[in-house]
């Protein structure tokens, strides 16, 4: 990749080094512990939320169906970045391959966009419940709820492929961040 004028530290395309807290090596252990606890709380809380909405039959309504999907999405969303961040903090090695960074970015923006559409589906559910309560069970049936969730995933997938491709066609310099995200790249 040719160097542009003024870019001395340019990637060769083989990967990145996620610098994170490299300026403060004494914080690595503390950060690892804090992020590990946060990750475990996220996994436990969202897993319990999803499990409870499956087990308790009184929670088999559209609102709780969407909340279950939101909990599962949150588990996936945090699992895109936190495990790599924890390994980088533990091993004090922030290297990530070019392809690994692209995959992390793709899933990060995919899951973030899906979350937005899922929240819009939840808002529609509440709108119908408030504005048309007599027809709520007819409108918000199981089939529509499944289509809204699947649609949330299917609509954003091709868009995020294009966005990830566009980001990775640009030249890169240092990545002073903890994970691969659009603004730092």
Image (cartoon, grey):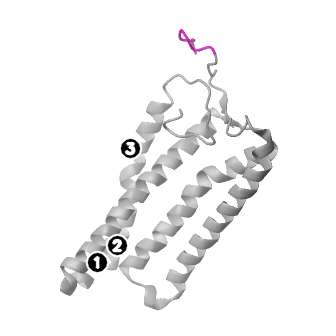
Q: Position of residue 70 (x, y in %)?
A: 47, 67
Quadrant containing the N terminus is top right
Q: Which mark is residue 145?
A: 2
Q: Earlier in the sequence, mark 2 or mark 3?
A: 2
Q: Position of residue 11 (x, y in %)?
A: 63, 22
Where on the picture, by quarter, is residue 76? bottom right
Q: Residue at x 31, y 68 (%)?
A: 123
Q: Position of residue 31 (x, y in %)?
A: 73, 51
Contact check, label 1 and label 3, Cβ < 8 Å = no
Q: How many badges with numbers are in the image? A: 3
Contact check, label 2 and label 1, Cβ < 8 Å = yes
For the residue labelled by badge 2, is the local secondary structure a helix, a strand or a loop? Answer: helix
The residue identified by callout 1 is 140
For the residue labelled by badge 3, is the local secondary structure a helix, a strand or a loop? Answer: helix
Q: Earlier in the sequence, mark 2 or mark 1?
A: 1
| Above-or-below relation of 12 to 133 | above
Q: Which mark is residue 159?
A: 3
Q: Nearer the viewer, residue 12 or 81?
A: 81
Magenta stretch, residue numbers? 1-8
| Relative to 51, 14 lies left or right | right
Q: Residue at x 48, y 54 (%)?
A: 111
Within 10 Å of the Cα at label 2, are there few (<14), some (14-19), or many (20+) other Cα atoms? many
Q: CA distance from mark 2 to mark 1?
A: 7 Å
Where on the picture, by quarter, is residue 15? top right
Q: Earlier in the sequence, mark 1 or mark 3?
A: 1
Asked if residue 105 is among those painted magenta in the image, a careful observer would answer no
């Amino acid at each position: 990749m040719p160097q542009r004028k003024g870019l001395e530290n340019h990637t060769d395309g083989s990967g990145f080094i996620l610098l994170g807290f490299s300026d403060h090596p004494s914080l690595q252990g503390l950060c690892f512990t804090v992020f590990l606890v946060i990750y475990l709380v996220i996994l436990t809380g969202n897993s319990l939320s999803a499990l409870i909405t499956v087990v308790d039959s009184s929670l088999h309504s559209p609102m709780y169906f969407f909340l279950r999907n939101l909990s599962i999405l949150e588990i996936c969303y945090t699992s895109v970045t936190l495990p790599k961040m924890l390994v980088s903090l533990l091993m004090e090695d922030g290297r990530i391959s070019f392809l690994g960074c692209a995959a992390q970015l793709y899933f990060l923006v995919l899951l973030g966009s899906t979350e937005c559409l899922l929240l819009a589906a939840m808002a529609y559910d509440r709108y119908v419940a408030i504005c048309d309560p007599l027809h709520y069970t007819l409108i918000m049936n199981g089939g529509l709820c499944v289509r809204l969730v699947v649609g949330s995933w299917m609509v954003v997938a091709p868009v995020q492929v294009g966005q990830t491709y566009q980001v990775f066609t640009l030249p890169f310099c240092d990545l002073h961040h903890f994970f691969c995200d659009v603004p730092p790249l």
